[in-house]
Amino acid sequence: MNDRTFDRPVFVRKGEFMVEEVECLADAFEFLQEWPKNRRGPIFDTAFRACQRAYDGQVPVSVAREAFAGFAKSAKILEDVSAAMPWMTAQKTGRGGVTA
């Protein structure tokens, strides 16, 4: 882990069926730069500035992570992966399969 890696990743929806893992400042910058210009606003700006300041060493990386997660939450794209998908936790039966 380098000094620009988040202590835990932020998971965001990207499109209708895709979830992206943002685990460092570089990932956050890339995601924010791809964000549509017409959907940017003050919360986006705050997250972007926090990432820039963390990159420059002015604030801890944890501040950038929290700002990015706040942006994702406000944009309604934050994914809660703490609740495992049912197919990941289903009880195994027989030859290693799971119940359908």
Image (cartoon, helix red, strand yellow):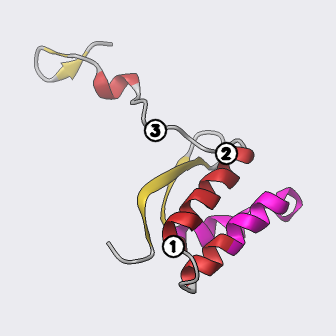
The residue that mark 1 highlights is 60
Residue 64, image quadrant: bottom right
The residue wearing badge 2 is 73
Give the mark nearest the N terminus, 2 or 3: 2
Find residue 5 and report its image quarter.
Answer: bottom left
Element marked by disc 1: loop
Q: CA distance from mark 1 to mark 2?
A: 20 Å
Disc marking residue 98:
none
In the rendered image, which quarter contains the N terminus? bottom left
Residue drawn at the location 57% of the way across and 86% of the way down: 56
Report the amino acid beneath label 3.
Val
Question: Residue at horizontal 51%, vertical 53%?
Answer: 10
Which kind of residue does numbered mark 2 sit on?
Lys
66 left or right, relative to 76: left
Q: Left or right: 38 with respect to 86?
A: right
Region rendered in magenta: 27-49
Which is nearer the N-term, disc 1 or disc 2?
A: 1
Magenta stretch: residue 39 in it? yes
Mark linked to residue 81: 3
Measured as percent of width and height from the top left, residue 85 is found at 41, 28
Residue 28 lies, in percent from the top left, at 58, 66
Q: From mark 2 to mark 3, how far is it between C-alphas?
A: 14 Å
Q: Main secondary structure of the magenta part?
A: helix
Q: Position of residue 52 (x, y in %)?
A: 64, 79
Q: Would you place residue 42 above or below residue 83 in this image?
A: below
Residue 81 lies in magenta, yes or no?
A: no
Q: Position of residue 35 (x, y in %)?
A: 74, 62
